[in-house]
Image: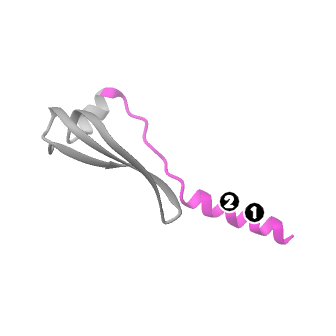
Amino acid sequence: MFRRILLLATLAAIAAMATTLEKLSMDEMIAKSTAIVRAKAVSSVGEIRSGMIFTHYRLQVAEALKGSAAPVVDVWV
């Protein structure tokens, strides 16, 4: 019985951290974007924060296609 309760509590905690993404067409993504760039990844590092895995990418911007961007952009995924 305890294992069943523990399993249900674990599944509830995982579901609480879940994310739902809106499926957008390419045109919708372009319209909603504040900046679009052509860039080269110059470094990437993975790390764990608050029990979640993130990857940090440092991008060297070659061209801004929409909006403006700094010469180097940091992105966490």
- The image quadrant of residue 34 is top left
Specify the amino acid type for callout 2. Answer: Leu
Residues 65 and 8: in front is: 65
Left or right: residue 46 versus residue 11 is left
Which residue does the image show at 31% across and 37% down from the upper left? 41
Give the extent of the magenta segment: 1-26
Disc 1: which residue: 7
Q: For the residue labelled by badge 1, is the local secondary structure a helix, a strand or a loop? A: helix
Q: Main secondary structure of the magenta part?
A: helix
Total labels drawn: 2
Give the Cα distance between marks 2 and 1. 6 Å
Mark linked to residue 76: none
Check if mark 2's residue and mark 1's residue have beta carbons within 8 Å. yes
Q: Position of residue 71 (x, y in %)?
A: 15, 42
Residues 53 and 9: in front is: 53
Check if residue 15 falls in the magenta segment: yes
Note whether 23 is above or below 27 in the view shown. Answer: below
Which residue does the image show at 38% across and 33% down from the upper left? 24
Q: Residues within 10 Å of mark 2 (few under 14, many from 20)?
A: few
Left or right: residue 52 versus residue 44 is right
Which residue does the image show at 51% across and 58% down from the upper left? 52
Note whether 40 is above or below 53 in the view shown. Answer: above
